[in-house]
Image (tube, rainbow, N blue to C red):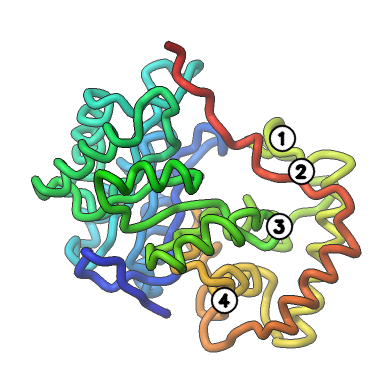
Amino acid sequence: MEYMSIPPLGQKVSRIGLGTWAMGGSLWGETDEAESVRTIHEALLSGITFIDTAPGYGFGLSEKVIGKALKLYGKRDDIVIATKFGLNLNDPMNVFRDSRRQAILQELETSLRNLQVDYIDLYQVHWPDPHTPQEETAALLKELLDQGKIRAIGVSNYSIDEINAFRKVAPIHAIQHPFNIFEREAEETILAYCKKEKIASLGYSSLCRGLLTGTLTEDFEFEDLRKNFDPKFRKPYFSQYLICVGRLEQWVKDKYNKTLVALAVRWSLDKGVNVALWGARRPDELKPIQEVMGWKLSQDDFKEIDQIIAETIHDPIGLEFMSPPHRQT
C-alpha cells in the first residue's frame, strides 16, 4: 500500500480509500450488514486506513455499519474516518442541500452516534448549499475543529469560487471530487487547484460505478441508481462504454499484465489524486488491491488510453445527474 499524509491528521493515510456508498443500500438496492462488516475488515487488513462515508448513504446505515465494524476491529486511532454533512434527510422523498448551523450540529451528533466514536477525523461538506453563505459554514467548521470534535475539514463537489470563499474563514484540508478515466472534468480545475495549494485531493467513483471493473455486459439488468439516473448505463451510450472498457482491459493486460480495475485506480493515482476511493460491499471486490501497487503509468500510456477513449466513445456523459436539489427558501 502507498501512504500519504493529510495535515493536521496524525495517522498515515492510505492512497486507496474504502468508499461505502453501496453499503448503505438505498439507491444501490439491498445490502447485507454482515457482508459489509467483512468487507471493511478485509480493507483494513489489506492496508487501507481511510474509510469514506456519509449520512446520505442509506440514511445513516453506512455509518452504522462502519461503527459496528470498527468496534469489532479496534485500533480506532490508526483509522481515518471521513464522513459528511449538508443534506437534509428528514424526508426520504425530498432530500435537499442544507448547511444551516443547527442542521450541521444535529448531523454531527447523529454521525458520532452512528459511528460510535468521540470525534470525526475528516468532516466534509457533502454538497454546497447556495442559500447558506460559505463563510457561515466555514465559521462553524472552524469552531468544531477548535473544540476537537473534528480533526480536519473537507469539502466535496465544490467549485473553486466556493472553495476560495470558504477558505477566507477556515482552512480546507481535503477536497473530494469525482475522478476516473471516464469522468475527468476535475483534472484541469479542482485537481490542479489542490496541487497548487497543497490540499489533499480525494477522487471518488474511481471505478465509475462498476463500469471500470470489466464485469458488466450489455444485457446486464440494473436494479439500482444506474438504471434510471446514469445515462452511461443506458442505450445508446452503454454499448460505446463497454467497447471502450474491453479495449482498455486488453491494453493493460498486454502491456502490464494487470486487470482493468488495477488500471482504473492506478490511472487516478498517477494523475495526481492523493486518495482514490474504491467502492465495495463484498470482500472479493477488494482482491485486486495489491495489483495497483508497484508500477506506474507513463505519459505515453496516458496518451494511448486517451486514444482508445477517443476511438470508442463518441457521446461522452458527464456527472450532471448526480447533483441533489437546492433547499427551497
Among the two numbered marks 1 and 4 on one chain, the one whose residue lies closer to the N terminus: 1
Among the two numbered marks 4 and 2 on one chain, the one whose residue lies closer to the N terminus: 2
| For residue 118, above or below residue 312 | above
Q: CA distance from mark 3 to mark 4?
A: 15 Å
Of circles 4 and 2, the one toward us is 4
Element on which disc 4 rests: helix
Mark on residue 182?
Answer: 3
Three-letter code for the amino acid on which mark 3 is drawn: Phe
| For residue 251, above or below residue 122 | below
Left/right of residue 3 with respect to residue 16 in the rendered view: left
Q: Do the residues bearing badges 4 and 2 touch, measured as CB atoms within 8 Å?
A: no
| Residue under pointer 4 | 270
| Residue under pointer 2 | 233
Element on which disc 2 rests: helix
Q: Do the residues bearing badges 3 and 4 touch, measured as CB atoms within 8 Å?
A: no
| Residue under pointer 1 | 227
| For residue 3, above or below residue 64 | below
